[in-house]
Amino acid sequence: MENLDAKRTQLEKFVGKWTTVGQILPTSNKAGTDIRGHESYEWLEGEYFLLHNSELEMGDRHQRTLEVFSFEEQESHFMTQFYDNIGNSGQFQVTLMDDLWIFRGETLLFKGGFSENDTVFSGVWEQLNQEKVWAPYMHIKLVKEV
């Protein structure tokens, strides 16, 4: 239980409402796309699971995502399960190494962290390309609303 309490403390930085800005990076055949929106993180009763709601405008596409964080004690890392309004679902294995948060999915990888007294969470998403190499995909920045 002590390990679980320490892990919950790590997730506590996410709790609250956030304003999100970012950009899907341009490619050789596609222009970059601005990202704007709002996100919130809140504990479900009992504080065993953290609920993440996201509502973003990605260019002309509206995307809502629901994600649940849990702690996998046997593996000593977090897992998330997400679902969105365009039919995507999946999982991320989430680890914290020093101050670096890493979200690793099948084809997406995020590396980033907190700054400015934990009021900013930012980083870079990478996507596994056709050559099976991680390539920068999206810059994202969440600013905690006061």
Image (cartoon, rainbow, N blue to C red):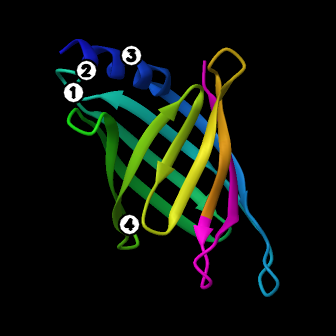
Tag 4: amino acid = Asn
**In the rendered image, which residue does mark 2 sit on?**
4
Q: Residues within 10 Å of mark 4 (few under 14, many from 20)?
A: few
C-alpha separation, residue under disc 1 versus residue under disc 4: 25 Å
Magenta region, residue range:
127-146
Q: Which mark is residue 9?
A: 3
C-alpha separation, residue under disc 3 versus residue under disc 4: 30 Å
Residue 12 in magenta stretch: no
C-alpha separation, residue under disc 3 versus residue under disc 2: 9 Å
Front: mark 2 or 4? 2
Q: Quadrant of residue 44?
A: top left
| Label 3 with label 4: CB-CB less than 8 Å | no
Q: Quadrant of residue 129?
A: bottom right
Q: Quadrant location of the C terminus?
A: top right
Q: Is residue 35 above or below residue 29?
A: above
- Where does the image place residue 26, in percent across and percent down from the top left? 79, 72
Front: mark 2 or 1? 2
Going from the N terminus, do you reach mark 2 or mark 1 first?
2
**In the rendered image, which residue does mark 1 sit on?**
48
Q: Secondary structure at mark 3?
A: helix
Q: Secondary structure at mark 4?
A: loop
Can the viewer see residue 28 in this picture?
yes
Residue at x 43%, y 60% (from the top left corner):
105
C-alpha separation, residue under disc 2 versus residue under disc 1: 9 Å
